[in-house]
């Protein structure tokens, strides 16, 4: 169970206390403050979520606000996405979402008004905020992808949007890797080096040793 979040103190999303140290990638994620978007695009097994969990710990230590939405956890439907997004931001500060509530309706115009209200709330709060949207490939609706696009386009200076996906994102923000405001990490960036592979196996071997043997099927 995750710890409850109080205003301004995001709950840590943790699956394990043991996370592989990847300082080179963490340095790249830290990046310049003018960055508006980070895209992690690679198939399952490349460590996208684990990297984001490690980065989350560093951000919390640096007193940065974090909101995390995992699309794979949500039922299909625009309203479920909007509700999850507002809940994640509202856990940081209810004032962020106060004026957005009236626009929580599943149509394109309402979604744009909702995003505008949210970015105004984030800007008014003033503190740096990192919004992580994991499993973007699970988005079933063009309205959800449009909302993510608008969050980047309307982002105030204190908002960084981070999107993790197994597939290419059908959004213009994913096609500007040379931009100083966008960082894109793909397979070659996320692939484990030999020392990282050895370290990962060293972490996993105790778990494998404790696992029950497979049933005999002879």
Image (cartoon, helix red, strand yellow):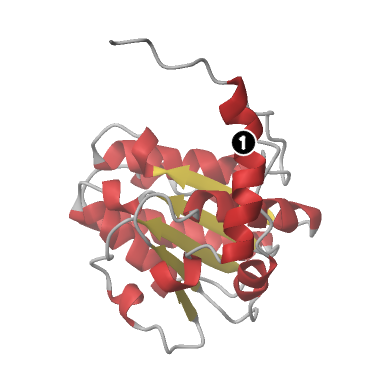
Q: Helix or strand or loop: what does disc 1 sit on?
A: helix
The C terminus, quarter of image: top left
Instruction: Assign the N terminus to one quadrant of the image.
Output: top right
In this rendering, the answer to whether 84 lies above or below 186 is above
Q: Is residue 144 above or below residue 101?
A: below
Residue 186 appears in the rendering: no
Against 105, is 22 above or below? below
x 38%, y 11%: residue: 215
Position of 181 with respect to 139 (left or right) is right
Q: Quadrant of residue 61?
A: bottom right
User: Quarter of the image holding residue 115?
Assistant: bottom left
Q: Residue at x 38, y 34 (%)?
A: 73
Question: Badge 1 is on which residue?
Answer: 205
- Across and down, in percent, residue 57 comes to 71, 51
The relative height of residue 4 versus residue 53 in the rendered view (above or below) is: above
Query: Which residue is depicted at the point 23% across and 54% down?
Result: 143
Pick the front one: 207 or 146? 207
Residue 205 visible, this angle: yes
Count of numbered tags: 1
Circle 1 packing at 10 Å, graded few (<14), some (14-19), many (20+), is few
Q: Position of residue 207 (x, y in %)?
A: 61, 29
Residue lying at 24% horizontally and 57% vertically, measured from the top left = 109
Closer to us: 49 or 203: 203
Image coordinates of residue 120 in percent, x first then y, are: 53, 63
Q: Is residue 107 left or right of residue 17?
A: left
Q: Nearer the viewer, residue 81 or 174?
A: 174
Residue 23 percent coordinates (x, y): 69, 67
């Amino acid at each position: 169970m995750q710890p409850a979040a109080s205003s301004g103190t995001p709950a840590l999303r943790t699956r394990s206390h043991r996370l592989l140290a990847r300082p080179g990638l963490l340095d790249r994620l830290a990046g310049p403050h003018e960055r508006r978007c980070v895209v992690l695009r690679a198939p399952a097994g490349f460590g996208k979520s684990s990297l984001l969990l490690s980065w989350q710990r560093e951000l919390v230590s640096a007193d940065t606000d974090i909101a995390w939405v995992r699309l794979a956890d949500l039922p299909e439907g625009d309203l479920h996405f909007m509700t999850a997004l507002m809940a994640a931001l509202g856990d940081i500060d209810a004032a962020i979402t106060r004026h957005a509530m009236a626009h929580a309706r599943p149509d394109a115009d309402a979604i744009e008004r909702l995003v505008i209200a949210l970015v105004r709330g984030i800007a008014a709060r003033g503190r740096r905020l990192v919004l992580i949207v994991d499993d973007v490939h699970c988005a079933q609706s063009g309205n959800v992808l449009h909302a993510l696009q608008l969050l980047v386009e309307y982002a105030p200076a204190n908002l960084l949007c981070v999107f993790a996906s197994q597939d290419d994102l059908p959004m213009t923000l994913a096609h500007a890797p040379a931009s100083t405001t966008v960082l894109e990490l793909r397979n070659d960036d996320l692939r484990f080096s030999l020392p990282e592979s050895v370290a990962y196996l060293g972490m996993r071997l105790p778990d494998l040793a404790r696992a029950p043997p497979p049933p005999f099927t002879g």
